[in-house]
Image (cartoon, grey):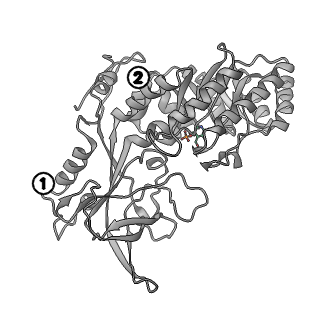
Amino acid sequence: VNKLTFNSHLTRQEKDLPPIHTLPVEDVLKNQLLALNNNSISISEDLNDAEVENAFFVADLGEILRQHLRWKATLPRVEPHYAVKCNPDPMILQLLAALGTGFDCASKAEIQSVLDLGVDPSRIIYANPCKQASFIRYAADKNVKMMTFDNAEELHKIKRYFPQAQLVLRILADDSKSLCQLGLKFGASLDSTSDLLRTARELGLNVIGVSFHVGSGCFDENAFADAVYRAKCVFDQASELGFDFQLLDVGGGFSHEHFSDGITFEKIAAVLGPAIDKYFPPNIRIIAEPGRYYAAPAFTIATHIIARRTVQHDRDETQFVDMEGVLNQVPSEGDVEQSYMFVYPKVLMKGDTFHFGVDLNEPKYTCSIWGPTCDSIDCITKNGTLPELLPGDWLYFQNMGAYTICAASQFNGFRKSNVTYTTTEASVLGILQGAI
Ligand code: PLP
């Protein structure tokens, strides 16, 4: 499918869309590898074309649709506003725009890319509590009214550049049970909220509600209920000061997992939904800013092993295999204090055989996996367990749609990986065409 007419309920315009396959992800991975190698499984010895060694993503747009339908069925009161920062892939944005979600944007460029799709500005929340003045002016010019704040200086800035904005007070949530703790940087503590509201009142600003973020990669659903209760307290403070709040924004941090001993979206919904209903009457509008919930499961990355370093381990004579150069798209899980995700490498191709992660009853080795740069900060994982692999073999990693490609670095001259699209839900093509 090379050219689809994008004709959703948003705008009528002809869009050149990239090709979208209608195959399972594994078939696309296989076809890509075969195509890269001119239909031969083994890579030519004297290859000089870097294309055949570069990592690439396969994006299943059907997964975005399934996640959306799951959200609607499980948490119907909450309107998702996709967090563009998580993965601003143009096809994700187009599909979600056609599905009618809102968008959480963090910058002028993100707002622009959503408006360019024909999305009405009222469907955007500018959810960055610290905004540069020119971006506030841009939002004012484009009539993107909803925006967050968590400090008095921001209120003065907004008063100056966009006094008609609809403001949402971002409060601090307990994010200690999450992979990425955003409260280190953002969120007003409850002992500062009434002062902030008073300042807003004095400035004549229109504060319409409260937002929070329990942290990205939250692994305790109770954090959501606790944050909803905090928001309710701020609603009470606001009403004492004469505000009439209409909006609660429950932020991001939603897991995409289905069946797991750990956190799942359904576990969060089972706690969050009742907490919202308990404290907020039906006339209060509830929105959320999910990022990884939508994007993570849609992307798989295939990576070529460019080098291997074998380390003899004296103590137990175990062979350690360090594989270098696997990924250049993933914030590392290794030494950084805040890791955005756990990664699980699987064997895609070993020698001349496609494995697709099937365990072949071979000896396994502990290994660490690194990106291709000359720096040691690009550790993908220190705790892999894989069969013996050689340069030229391929790994793949599933659930790689969130905070990967958008956070990729071109450090050391490496380039970002290409994305090939497929959909395992045929109706996606019609939705993008505006036919459904
Ligand atoms: N909203 C805001 C303000 C954020 O900063 C983020 C992530 O950093 C998100 C939403 C998305 O979070 P998640 O991907 O965990 O859903």
Residue that badge 1 annotates: 39
Q: From this view, report whether residue 339 is shown above or below residue 315.
A: above
Quadrant hosting residue 326: bottom left
How far apart in space, not on screen, are marks 2 and 1 (Cα)?
A: 37 Å
Q: Is residue 101 visible?
A: no
The residue positioned 52% from the left and 46% from the top of the image is: 262
How many callouts does the rendering have? 2
Q: Is residue 403 found left or right of 43 in the rendered image?
A: right
The residue positioned 29% from the left and 36% from the top of the image is: 18
Q: From this view, report whether residue 203 is shown above or below residue 220.
A: above
Residue type highlighted by circle 2: Ala
Q: Residues within 10 Å of mark 1 (few under 14, many from 20)?
A: few
Q: Is residue 167 visible?
A: yes
Residue 24, horizontal then vertical, whole percent: 25, 40
Residue that badge 2 annotates: 98
On-image quarter of the C terminus:
top left
Report ligand 1 position as a quadrant.
top right
Q: Residue at the far top: name it.
A: 283
Q: Earlier in the sequence, mark 2 or mark 1?
A: 1
Residue 43, horizontal then vertical, whole percent: 18, 64
Residue type highlighted by circle 1: Asn
The residue positioned 57% from the left and 40% from the top of the image is: 253
Q: Residue at the far bottom: name it.
A: 314
The residue positioned 43% from the left and 83% from the top of the image is: 316
On-image quarter of the N terminus:
top left
Local SS, label 1:
loop
